[in-house]
Image: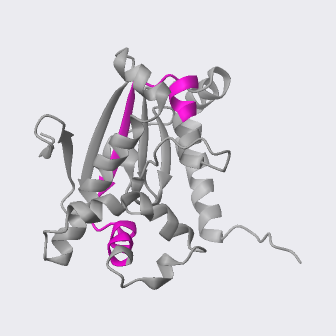
Amino acid sequence: MSFAHKLPSYLVNRFRGWHATAYVENKSWFRHLADEGQHPRSMLIACCDSRVHVTAIFGADQGEFFIHRNIANLVPPFTPTGDHHGTSAAIEYAVTSLHVAHLIVVGHSNCGGVRGCHDMCAGTAPELEKETSFVGRWMEILRPGFDRTADIADKDKRVMAMELEAVRISLTNLMTFPFIRDAVEAERLTLHGLWHDIGEGTLEAYDVETDSFLPVA
């Protein structure tokens, strides 16, 4: 049985347009990247959500950011079990091989993964509670955020609060990785947490001293 099909025509046309313009106009830069390798200053951990365009938010070009995306921009705790750990592997490579100076977790508004976690923890999404649900098992990372927002009665407000908790929990879990803790203590690496409002186009940064998210001016 064949599983490979022709690339959709709209993607073929977009590639041709990119190659004829952006690539041709910047050919020397692309060849420089190919020959010299990547030297990003920052790693971004963002959500898979197609509405979260992290490179556009920061006006980034190729080669500037090392980017990892997963459901709800979560970082698991340091758990060297020998299983497949895609997020942890990406973080290890960024910190120990690429020596990025900044590691940035980017949360966002209207996150479907976070809402799914809320519903699972509230007992209204039994499909996510099954052992066979990859999404459900992944979202268990955020369960403490559900518990910490128990006093918020309004569901939408609680889900938004959980979006912020996803960033906080990820930052906390990052510090459980020995190589991250060592780099932070040696001042070779800084951690940052952001939350992006898709509809308003705004960005808020986590302030550790006040444990709050403040607007980025």
Q: State the image quarter where residue 37 is shown.
A: top right
The front one of 62 and 170 is 170
Q: Is residue 217 magenta?
A: no
Q: Is residue 139 above or below residue 170?
A: below
Q: State the image quarter where residue 113 is shown.
A: bottom left
Q: Position of residue 50 (x, y in %)?
A: 43, 63
Left or right relative to 48: residue 32:
right
Q: Position of residue 24 (x, y in %)?
A: 59, 38
Q: Is residue 197 visible?
A: no
Left or right relative to 140: residue 106:
left
Q: Is residue 193 above or below residue 37?
A: below
As drawn, which residue projects farthest toward the top? 186
How many numbered marks appear?
0
Residue drawn at point x = 35 percent, y = 74 percent? 121
Residue drawn at point x = 51 percent, y = 37 percent? 91
Left or right relative to 181: residue 147:
left
Q: State the image quarter where residue 158 is shown.
A: bottom left
Residue drawn at point x = 45 percent, y = 36 percent? 61
As drawn, which residue projects farthest toward the right? 1
Q: Is residue 196 visible?
A: yes
Q: How is the image coloured?
A: one colour
State which quarter of the image contains the N terminus: bottom right
The front one of 1 and 117 is 117
State which quarter of the image contains the C terminus: top left
Residues shaded magenta? 92-119
Q: Is residue 55 above or below residue 123?
A: above
Q: Position of residue 2 (x, y in %)?
A: 86, 74
Q: Position of residue 55 (x, y in %)?
A: 40, 45
Residue drawn at point x = 51 percent, y = 66 percent? 137
